[in-house]
Amino acid sequence: MTIRNNMTLSSVEKNKGLAAAMKMEPAGVIGIIRGSGMKGRGGAGFPTGAKWHFAASAKGERKFVVCNADEGEPGTFKDRVLMDEWPDLIFEGMTIAGYAIGAQEGILYLRGEYTYIRKALEECLAKRREENLLGNHVLGNSNFSFDIHIHMGCGAYVCGEETALIESLEGYRGEARNRPPFPVNTGLNGMPTIVNNVETFAWTSAILVNGADWFKAIGTSKSTGPKMLSISGDVECPGVYEFPMGTTVNDVLDAAGCDCAKAVIIGGASGHCLPPAEFSRAICYEDISTGGAVIVFGPDRDMLDVAESFLEFFADESCGQCTPCRIGNVKLLEGVRMLKCGKCSTNCLRDLCALGETMQCASKCGLGQSSPNAFLSIVRHFKNEILGRACTAAES
Amino acid sequence: MLTTQQDRLMGEINELVEVHGHDRSALIPILQDIQSRYHAISDFTMQVVADRLEIHPVEVFGVVTFYSFLNEKHHGHFVIRVCRTISCDMAGKDAVAQQLRSDLGIDFGETTSDGRFTLEWANCIGMCDQGPAMLVNDHVLTHVTPERVHDILAACEKTFGPHTPQSDEEHTL
Amino acid sequence: MKDTNACADDTCRAPVSQRTQVVDAPGTSATVKLKIDDHELNIPMGTTILEAARELGIHIPTLCHHDDLCVAGVCRVCLVEVEGQNTLQASCAYPITQPITVKTHTRKVRQARRHIIDLLLSKHYGECYSCFRNNNCELQSLAKEYGVDFFRFGHPEKPLYEVDRSSYSVVRDMNKCVLCRRCIRTCIDLQEVGVLEAAGRSDGTTISTYLDKPLGEVVCINCGQCINRCPTGALRAKDRTDDVWAAIDNPEKHVVIQTAPSPRAGIGEEFNQEPGTPMTWKMNTALKRCGFDKVFDTNFTADLTIIEEGTELILRLYKNLVQSDSSQPLPQFTSCSPGWVKYIEHFYPEYLPHVSTCKSPQQMFGALIKTWYARMNNIDPANIVSVALMPCSAKKFECNRPEMRDSGYKDVDNGLTTRELAQMIREAGIDLPEMPKSDFDNPFGTATGSGVIFGSTGGVMEAALRSVIEFVTGKKVENFYDHANIIPVRGFEGCRYAELQIPDEVGPVPELIQHLVPNWDWLKGATLKVGIAHGTANAKKVMENIKAGGKFSECHFIEFMACPGGCLGGGGQPIPTSPEIRAARARAIYAEDAAYGDAGKARKSHENPAVLRLYSEFLTNGPCGHKSHHLLHTHYTARGKYIG
């Protein structure tokens, strides 16, 4: 019921990509991924092939492949569906990545809220071990042994940030690290580590089967391949959709069944809010980049409620180490509540927006840098709705 | 705590250390196992775990207070986490939350006096297309309505005892 | 001389993210081109932007950065613009590994810094004029630097947290905390005590003890290193100046003060003097003008400690090596650092029999003042108020230990830190640097250079060796070491090890200790092995080495100091601290030692005439005799690390 349109991954033959990779040199595998032009599906859009290349050329006694299944972005659930439907493709993609960078160990970091998926994933892993798709000498390749285990998250959105995720894997509080150094050089236990999104690994398997050119032919020149989108909110058919990169917001809305959207937020709580005038924009890295969340708002929605909800989210989920994110989100939230009860002066609003811009450039990690996005874009596009509200008693 | 209880707990922690390892990276898996068994990570536990992993108790405390799913205070047998994030909010989570408050007689962040239920907010649990959604322990419930709340709680009550609900019981909830 | 950074090596506990970054550069001498503001230069690969800027004299404000600590990058005050990067970069945490162009004060940078300061102030409760860090507060300085003249994002009207005054030594006021986490990095990484850590998350993040218990109930060793590194007034030593003033103002009371060697090397910093400006003789005058009846030199009991502890060492060596009696095992550990003593009580209680039973010089002094001094001067000890000026916050705890009442009274009534005394001197309207010089009072006025160097790491060991060598060989130390400077035990390396060969000739042994053992031949040709550790993280390394049977387990005598640099880096010393400041203070201390020699005064503890007089008049059963055992020795409590 969650899957709403035709999914390419349904037709990808399991383990064919891994078998193909085993016949190549690791560098050849990386070459194919680079050739596909795939960028990370988590939203940051770093070219996957380049990341793998860095990790492959980094020195380290051990290397790690980490699958980021800490899908916590509000409005995103495509990874859950991917793990439900195609766990083999994900583990296969991780194994291919392990072969490509010279890793021996893979870890799937599954968010605690998805504990109910774990059992099926463990069963899938056990089966793969039986079939020699994991373990010693994968598929008889005497140069490659690789295993994957699942590490459960513990209820912290920030652990979706790759360095916070690594800290969490090491048993620390999930607080983002300074970058540089980057995980590809100094990651888990100080060893070269790649952290990729669930969807990235699934597409890896598909690319190894269908070829880099197939992938490249889909989407735009800078954003290749298909993208899974999680669509929710005021639409007739919420769920997971697959679109080629570069699809416009209008096309997405049509597919999901909504003709009266007042606003769409692309990228979840850390994403940007678009008014109808911008629905012709394309979902791709060069226009509106996203990890896959599309939240649609009907004509009766109060955009300040939306901003408040997101800021409540960040004020709770900030790891609390850096100043702009820890205090900034609370100040923005207080500001939104003042706006809601008609008690925020224009000057004060300007200060809040300036603070939001500071948070974007001054926060330590992606969480803080993107947390004011929704607020700032809502203010930009819905100022008339925000200012001049009737003065009401402040909410407790 | 009685000495015998302490001994038993210490034995369990030693076993967990054998399973998960002595490194700091074993900390969170150990704590997760203890949390699910005891619904809390006690003072004594934190100190023993710290000792076994050769870290400071305050570091364990720092970790426990950081993650939402680890708690030093006792939680109920059933932890109900209602998603409060935008899509579930728009789908009507407030009504569900209010019904839960009324039926359980507690507010969010509280545990019933019989120790059965804890009510908490959750941030997005990834069921945005099927909201309002909530988790009862590890099980996800979607399209929850105020009307269904009573049945859900009753199903929990029925399974109350030494066992938490198994995954195949999910449909009966 | 530079402290070994506790966070740079393999044994560091700090998360990878915070350790000093080791940059994998092709060729270690590789350089990289940097353009920063108007400067263009080549710098060694891996230099941080902040380090490079400081080299060039470009000021970048910082808050969470500290020279002693590993990188955090959390306050974001030191942001700069790096060309080609969308976001601003924390200069303290950005190692330069490829050519970059940096701008340090663009509009974007200035606005971000200002916002960050505004945000910090919005959570910082308190008024500057009622804060002990007024005029010495990094947050206040930042606010001034960025022209803060209103609270853009508000200001707390009420305190959120109760001030924790449970500890004898350290007071925590989390209302003033800005979450820079220097205290955490000090406590966990630098000292490895592990009292403080961040708890909670997001806006609810706090610096917390275990279960948020009062500081007095957790494994805190009172070293006060967190105080020295706190940028604001969130951490401070417990203030006893009111009690001391009250005693001074009370005509019934005879108020005496003993002053340790390190405060005099540091107190000048409180009066705008360069670090390392010695203030010994001026401070004596200031103390008398403040109203203290007598000003004594703790170095007197430092010398006494050497005699007692040296005697104990000889007895232990004889028992272990000749009599095969291991009831008082080797190596013998020093006991003069109360932070170290509490550390071992908590973390290695099974090793307490190794700790010398000698009280610290402060407590020996206290016991003598209320006995010998009181009797000699016909003063009722009940009317004596004994104050100790120490560089140390742990001394405040130490003087309140229940076992420290051997005189029949509380041996030391109040411990003052260097900072508190500076405050008293200011309050009395005294300009310390302008004071005339004056001497210490007798009978405890005579000290030696050996007592002075107690203030520095390796000092106790050097003082002890000066005496032990002369005791055992019957020859002057100068025959073995130029000017009696035992260089192998000096320096700032975290853990040090040295061996001394005792020649084949032994004696004549001085009369004072001759009776201790039936003969001294067993020492002929022996090799004396000694160790030194400063900072409890290094102490831990040595203890673990001993546990594992490493080279330190073969030592005979090990000096442990809780604070990095020894007492001169103590938790009661002027703020700020840094490796350079501590090195400057050390220079002042060693210069004072040398000055004793230049003036023809004694530089070895056993030559202190006042100490010899004490043994002939009062402690008549000699070192480690019955009477000195009663007054000058103590016992310890195995505390363990479980928190009840």
Image (cartoon, grey):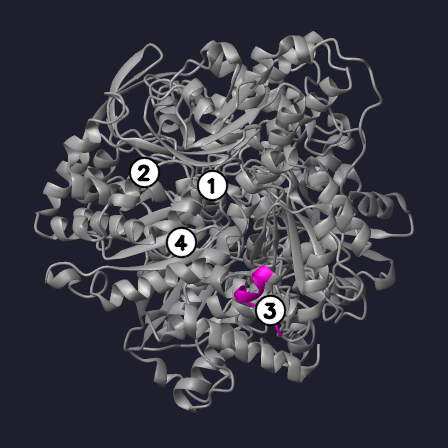
Magenta region: which residues?
A: B163-171
Quadrant in the picture for residue C273: top right
Residue type highlighted by circle 2 = Phe
Query: Is residue A157 or residue B62 the one in the foreground?
Result: A157
**Residues flagged by tags 4 and 3 on a common chain:** no
Q: Are marks 2 and 4 on the same chain?
A: no
Q: Is residue B91 visible?
A: yes
- Residue A118, x across and y down, in percent: 44, 59
Of badges 2 and 1, the one in the foreground is 1
Q: Do the dots labelled 2 and 1 sit on one chain?
A: yes
Q: Work out whether residue A330 or residue C401 is closer to the camera in this orientation and state it.
A: A330
Kindly identify the amino acid type of the residue bearing the numbered disc 1. Phe
**Disc number lying in front (4 or 3):** 3
Read off the chain for label 2. A
Q: Mark 3 highlights which residue?
A: B45
Label at residue C12: 4
Residue bearing mark 1? A77
Question: In the image, residue C6 lies at what x, y percent?
Answer: 41, 50
Q: Are marks 2 and 3 on the same chain?
A: no
Mark 1 and mark 3 in contact? Answer it, CB < 8 Å.
Answer: no
For disc 4, the chain is C
Mark nearer the N terminus (2 vs 1): 1
Residue with the mark numbered 2: A182
Q: Position of residue A395 (x, y in %)?
A: 80, 28
C-alpha distance separating marks 4 and 3? 25 Å
Q: CA distance from mark 2 to mark 1?
A: 27 Å
Above or below residue A253? Residue C497 is below
Locate residue B72, reporting x and y percent. Answer: 65, 60
Q: Secondary structure at mark 3?
A: helix
